Amino acid sequence: QVQLVESGGGLVQAGGSLRLSCAASGGTFINYAMGWFRQTPGKEREFVAAITRSGRITYYLDSVKGRFTISRDNAKNTVYLRMNSLKPEDTAVYYCAAVRTSDIPSTSSRYDYWGQGTQVTVSS
């Protein structure tokens, strides 16, 4: 059973930056592809970014390409989401997720483990 704990959310002005972290425990981290999703009230959870087990391949939602960067440190069992040039429409609860696969899934149903979420609020 994998446990995921996100941190790093907060309130930031438009144009600012945040770095989210997700610490994993309870499994062999390098066996898991990792993803970041976000959700706002009344909407379905939305894919943001994903990274393969090795960290060599990443995949992004079109609207965050060039602004967000997903990375992982397998020695620290942690995945990160660096968010630059934040916009008010990036406001959401951000979740990290894990799945044991060599693939790089972008749909929430593919992921088996989820963190509790961290709130990101971008003011205009």
Image: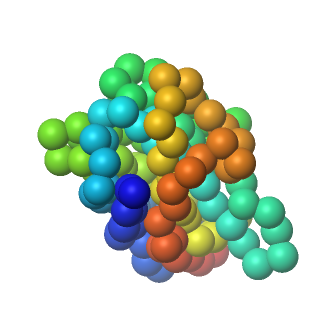
Of 3 and 11, nearer the camera is 3
**Quarter-of-image position of residue 106:** top right
Q: Is residue 18 left or right of residue 60?
A: left
> Looking at the image, which residue is at 29% across and 56% down?
26
State the quadrant of the C terminus. bottom right
Tell which residue pokes out farthest to the right in this image. 42
Q: Is residue 97 left or right of residue 44?
A: left
Of 51 and 119, nearer the camera is 51
Above-or-below relation of 102 to 27: above
Tell which residue pokes out farthest to the left in this image. 75
**Quarter-of-image position of residue 29:** top left
Tell which residue pokes out farthest to the front in this image. 1
Q: How many marks?
A: 0
Above-or-below relation of 10 to 79: below
Percent across and percent down for residue 109 are 71, 48
State the quadrant of the N terminus. bottom left
> Looking at the image, which residue is at 51% across and 56% down?
113
**Residue 110, visible in the rendered structure:** yes
Q: How is the image coloured?
A: rainbow
> Looking at the image, which residue is at 49% across and 73% down?
116
Above-or-below relation of 93 to 20: below
Q: Is residue 41 left or right of residue 61?
A: right
Q: Is residue 70 left or right of residue 47?
A: left
Percent across and percent down for residue 4 are 39, 62
Percent across and percent down for residue 74 are 23, 38
**Residue 68, visible in the rendered structure:** no
Percent across and percent down for residue 67 are 52, 43
